[in-house]
Amino acid sequence: MHKTLLLLLAGAAIAAEIKPLPAPVVTGGMPLMEAINARQSGRVYNPAHKINDQTLSEVLWVAWGIANHGKRTIPTARNTQNMGLYVLTPEGTWRYNAADNCLEKVNDKNLISLCEKQDFVKNAPLHLIYTAKDDRWGRAHVGSAYQNVYLYATSKGLNTVIRGMIDTAALTQAMDLPDGQVVIAHQTLGYAQ
Ligand SMILES: Cc1cc2nc3c(=O)[nH]c(=O)nc-3n(C[C@H](O)[C@H](O)[C@H](O)COP(=O)(O)O)c2cc1C
């Protein structure tokens, strides 16, 4: 077969690897003031207690989803909306597509090892990676997103911690990020028991 056609077919196969997510439930939960009052970092995870797709969908939505009024769940400077949110799994790296409420596989690499500078990390069933432009407001956008995840986790009895102790340069390179994006932070989630 012609080499170009093979490449096109390979590209189509990668693009087709999509994990649809259930619609997030965007009502209820702990009252906001109680969640803020209870928020804290949690580093104890039971690796056997997996996070189901409903919870995964809601974690992604609070961080970087699109609300019913059509805007993102977090503000961005001049509405640039140029943050990226990824899920690392042993089977590969997935990019959150908020508009289509799905995860798109971007590679088959297990990049969790590039985040494992602390022992508890290996026990976490969910690994988020935040990316942004390395500009004035990129890190501020990530901060808004991870705080939303902290509050959601508090509301749902999940432990979470945002982490900067990762190999950001190696991750940025390995993830083939688009458009000048760099890896900013890693966030682990899981249940203590
Ligand atoms: C930008 C940032 C980077 C952080 N990096 C790490 C990290 O690499 N590892 C870790 O265990 N905690 C990390 N933390 C969590 C802090 O240690 C934690 O927020 C702080 O000790 C206060 O505890 P609290 O979140 O329970 O209030 C980080 C927090 C922030 C905001």
Image (cartoon, rainbow, N blue to C red):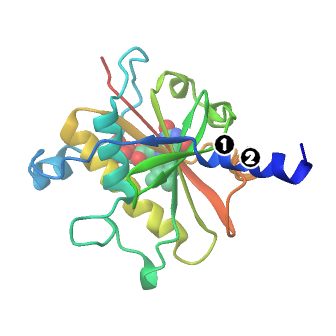
Instruction: Name the residue rendered at 35%, 59% in the picture.
Output: 65
**Corner quadrant of residue 93:** top right
**Most distant residue in the front direction:** 1
The vertical placement of 34 against 156, above or below, is below
Q: Quadrant of the N terminus?
A: top right
- Please provide percent x and percent y for residue 159: 33, 33
The one of 143 and 132 positioned closer to us in this rendering: 132
Q: Residue at x 47, y 61 (%)?
A: 142
Compared across the picture, whether 39 is left or right of 35 comes to right
Would residue 64 be found to the left or right of residue 28 on screen? right
| Residue extending farthest top | 48
Q: Secondary structure at mark 1?
A: helix
Task: Name the residue beneath numbered marker 1.
Answer: 13
Which mark is drawn over residue 95? Answer: none
Mark 2 Cα-neighbour bin, 10 Å: few <14, some 14–19, many ≥20: few
Q: In which image quadrant can residue 165 be found?
A: top right
Q: Which residue has dot 2 on it? A: 9
Disc 2 vs disc 1: Cβ atoms closer than 8 Å? yes
